[in-house]
Amino acid sequence: MSTIKDIEERRNLLDASFNAVLKKIGKVKIGEPHQFPFGWRKAAKGRTVWRILEELITQNLEKHYKDIGLTEINPAESEVGVYDLSCKVTGHNKKLYVNVMIYHVKLLVTTKSYM
């Protein structure tokens, strides 16, 4: 059975892994202002952009897992499951189940028409 200290250590290691992969990814630009003459509209509020970013993060975790402190990573088989991937952090054998959540996205919306 895991202690609170064990759980906290794994969570901190996982957090460091996520920060490392986000640094590798850098800024993500989805479209140019001239391609969205009326801004993001409903996509800015909904699942559209979030889902793209979740997939981007999951794929980069899968690609770079050995470089960012993970020893194993397995993307979820189902699109509608309760987690996006399972993984193990270096130095620990317990499998962790991760649901990638996007809780803050900075969207630059323009009202200027480039057409």
Image: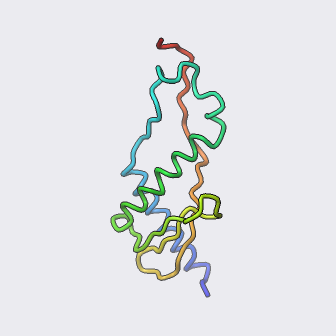
Numbered-mark total:
0
Taking 58 as reference, is 32 above or below it? above
- Name the one closer to the observer, 101 or 2: 101
Q: In what quadrant of the picture does the N terminus appear?
A: bottom right
**Which residue is located at x 53 percent, y 51 percent?**
54
Asked whether 65 or 1 is in front, the reply is 65
Looking at the picture, tell me which residue is in the foreground, 50 or 89.
50
Q: Residue at coordinates 62% horizontally, 34% vertically from top-left?
A: 43
* Residue 1 falls left or right of residue 54: right
Q: Residue furthest front?
A: 78
Q: Is residue 54 above or below residue 49?
A: below
- Residue 109's place in the image compared with 114, above or below, is below
Residue at position x 52%, y 45% in the image: 52
Chosen colour scheme: rainbow
Residue 41, percent across and down? 63, 27
Residue 62's image quarter?
bottom left
Q: Position of residue 78 (x, y in %)?
A: 59, 63
